[in-house]
Image (cartoon, rainbow, N blue to C red):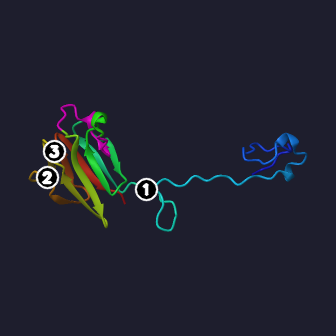
Amino acid sequence: MVHTSSPQPDYIPPQIEQPVAQAANFGSISMAPLAVEPLAEGSADESGEQTVKHAHATLVIERGGTPGTEFTLINDESTIGRWDADNGIFPDVDLDAYDDDAKVSRRHARISRNNGSYFIEDLGSTNGTYVNRGRRLLPGNIQILNDGDEVIVGKTFLRFLVTR
């Protein structure tokens, strides 16, 4: 901190034990320890170090909705679907605004990451999930998902890209 010629600091925390008005010398002000709020659950690793989640993959709309729209995946499990506050459904990849015909189910599919490998499964959607225009995925059956694969949910075509 750079000190100016003014003897008063820019900010005095509220935990000062004696009022500033009574202190003749700012150097004699003692401060009570600052309270530290605990980290949010799941935000620290085993050693107590805070962890920051980074995008490990993206889904990019290629057809349907607004082509070029990107969705970043930061969790090891990400759901694809349509937002529905009334029923408490808040997918990680929310296609509600990009699915005019409502062909994407509210809980449509899930992408999982495990030890650097990716998997996709259909969650019992009405209009199906397809990878690379292959056969419709059966609900609950997990299929490997590779960098560059095309994922079709309803009428929305997405490109799956692993972030390097």
Of the pair 35 and 59, the residue shown nearer to us: 35
Judged from the image, the secondary structure of the residue bearing numbered disc 2 is loop
Above or below residue 70? Residue 49 is below
Residue 146: image x %, image y %? 23, 60
| 114 lies left or right of 26 | left
- SS for tag 1? loop
Image: magenta residue range: 89-103
Label located before the other in sequence (2 or 1): 1
Q: Residues under labels 2 and 1: Cα distance?
A: 29 Å
Q: Residue at x 18, y 49 (%)?
A: 123
Rendering coords of residue 4 (x, y %): 82, 45
User: Which residue is label 1 attached to?
Assistant: 53
Residue tagged 2: 139
Is residue 95 rendered magenta in the image?
Answer: yes
Using the numbered discs, state the Cα–Cα distance from disc 3 to disc 1 in whole angstroms: 29 Å
Q: Is residue 50 left or right of residue 115?
A: right
Q: Are marks 3 and 2 in contact (CB under 8 Å)?
A: yes
- Callout 3: SS: loop
Residue drawn at the location 26% of the way across and 58% of the way down: 147
Seen at 29% across and 33% down, the residue is 86
Query: Answer yes or no: do the residues labelled 3 and 1 have beta carbons within 8 Å?
Result: no
Q: Which residue is mark 3?
A: 125
- Quadrant hosting residue 42: bottom left
- Name the amino acid type tagged 2: Pro
Question: Residue 86 or 97: which is nearer the viewer?
Answer: 86
Please provide percent x and percent y for residue 17.
Answer: 78, 48
Q: Residue furthest top?
A: 100
Please identify, in this view, whether the residue under mark 3 or under mark 1 is nearer the observer: 3
